[in-house]
Image (spheres, coloured by chain):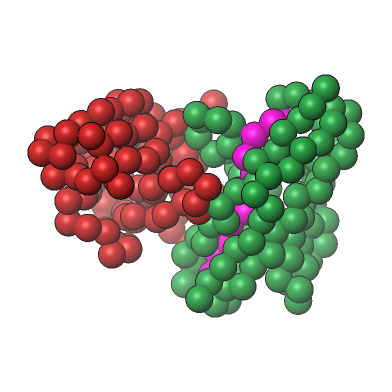
Chain colours: A green, B red
Amino acid sequence: GQNIDQPTEMTATEGAIVQINCTYQTSGFNGLFWYQQHAGEAPTFLSYNVLDGLEEKGRFSSFLSRSKGYSYLLLKELQMKDSASYLCAVTDSNYQLIWGAGTKLIIKP
Amino acid sequence: ETGVTQTPRHLVMGMTNKKSLKCEQHLGHNAMYWYKQSAKKPLELMFVYSLEERVENNSVPSRFSPECPNSSHLFLHLHTLQPEDSALYLCASSPILAGGPTDTQYFGPGTRLTVL
């Protein structure tokens, strides 16, 4: 079966750095997405990786290793507004998007 | 800001009611999606439309009936639901239905559905 694994919940301190991991087992691979979802709101697109390596976008970076079936989202200089759920999703060989259950990130002052 | 709107935002219905959820996208996209989101579970893809044709129906019970009259509008008709159908129903759209960054999905705020 197809599977995306992420930690259920993480806690970090304002101003610090946090890394949210995602591992996947899918039938084929055509890209990996990270989305942010604040409570009661729509998921919003953060990043897309299809090649190995690091993609940096401001305070957020996303890393991909296709050989390891692994990605992480790195958040730097954490702010209280970064408290949200972070969803990892992989496009499989049929171009179907397979979603993880999300990681709830709690930021403490 | 989202270019995808959903109404109503909240809905409470009995098991014998019939109701409809509405989604509208203002992004000029050609693909639209219905998802079910339950607490601590992955997003469940329900239906996919590409250019107003249904291309995906993931074994969804017939009490959920989608309708896509044009590329900007998507409906989900609800009939004889069960309490376990209570969830957040999200609509999304993407430029095209294909792999890659052009498949980035843009979500609406969702309808919080409670079935009594």
Is the residue B91 above or below the residue B57 in the image? above
Question: Which residue appears at 74% of the width and 60% of the height?
Answer: A71
Q: Is residue B97 left or right of residue A53?
A: left
Residue A42: give x, y in percent of width and height.
Answer: 50, 34
Q: Which residues are magenta?
A: A82-93
Question: Which residue appears at 88% of the width and 28% of the height?
Answer: A15
Q: Nearer the viewer, residue A2 or B41?
A: B41
Question: Which residue appears at 58% of the width and 37% of the height?
Answer: A37
Residue A79: give x, y in percent of width and height.
Answer: 79, 26
Q: Is residue A90 left or right of residue A10?
A: left
Q: Examine the image and state in which quarter residue A60 appears.
A: top right
Q: Nearer the viewer, residue B97 or B84?
A: B84
Q: Main secondary structure of the magenta part?
A: strand
Residue A84 in the magenta stretch? The answer is yes
Q: Is residue B31 left or right of residue A94?
A: left
Residue B111: give x, y in percent of width and height.
Answer: 35, 32
Residue A106 shows up from this direction = yes
Q: Examine the image and state in which quarter residue B88 appears.
A: top left
Quadrant of the drawing holding the C terminus of chain B: top left
Is the residue A81 above or below the residue B51 in the image? above
Q: Nearer the viewer, residue B20 or B17?
A: B17
Residue B36: give x, y in percent of width and height.
Answer: 38, 47
Quadrant of the drawing holding the N terminus of chain B: top right
Residue A33 shows up from this direction = no
